[in-house]
Image: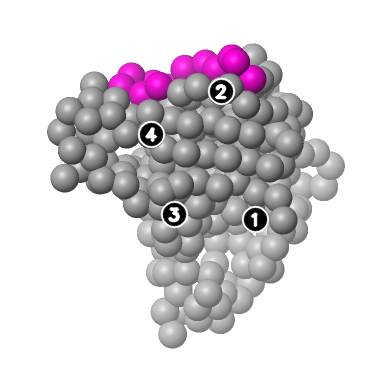
Amino acid sequence: AQSVTQLDSQVPVFEEAPVELRCNYSSSVSVYLFWYVQYPNQGLQLLLKYLSGSTLVKGINGFEAEFNKSQTSFHLRKPSVHISDTAEYFCAVTSGVIQGAQKLVFGQGTRLTINP
Amino acid sequence: DGGITQSPKYLFRKEGQNVTLSCEQNLNHDAMYWYRQDPGQGLRLIYYSQIVNDFQKGDIAEGYSVSREKKESFPLTVTSAQKNPTAFYLCASSIQILNQPQHFGDGTRLSIL
């Protein structure tokens, strides 16, 4: 069975500092990986996705993530954060379709707080 | 613009009452999903449907029911059998290709009176 572990439940960072949100997954087969962002009282918005090819993936809002197959990791990074990046971030993995629908497994989330 | 509409945004349930959460999408997606979100637990799958008139239980289906009579609509009923219904409920949809992302609505927050 697949699982996703987000190693930090909360990450406080000062504005304009770099940030890394860590995600590790377990799966015995090839996977597709996603990062989503959730602002307060809203749904999830896709930040970026890894499907195949280059292991460095660029997303929206200046975020990027690196897929590392040997370490089964997919860490999210941003070189300089802004107050508006304050949100909860979810890592998700899928490798299977269950009866025509996509089976996504989510991590527990990381709450990113940007301080002025 | 295409998207997913969930209503209401806030909902209150009395003891012993069933309540229904609405989810409508105009993305022409075949697959639809319901998730429950609790603080610190991420998202957990309640039910999913890959096609009209067919749906399957997810990881935490007990106390919930769904229907899929139209491609665009996938309502979730929280029954009185669900003893801890207070949570944030998210509806999502996707096309039936493995590597395509799910699209989410803005959620319904359910509380107990």
Residue annotated with mark 4 = B20
In 3D space, how far apart are the residues under numbered discs 3 and 4 (Cα atoms)?
A: 30 Å
**Callout 1 touching callout 3 (CB < 8 Å):** no
Whether residue B88 sits left or right of residue B31 in the image: it is left
Residue annotated with mark 1 = A47
Residue A53: % across, % down: 84, 42
Number of numbered discs on residues: 4
In 3D space, how far apart are the residues under numbered discs 4 and 2 (Cα atoms)?
A: 13 Å
> Which residue type does callout 2 highlight?
Arg
Nearest the camera: A98 or B86?
A: B86
Residue A21: % across, % down: 52, 57
Q: Are labels 1 and 2 on one chain? A: no
Residue annotated with mark 3 = A110
The residue segment tinted magenta is: B52-65
> Which residue type does callout 3 highlight?
Thr
> Which residue type does callout 4 highlight?
Thr
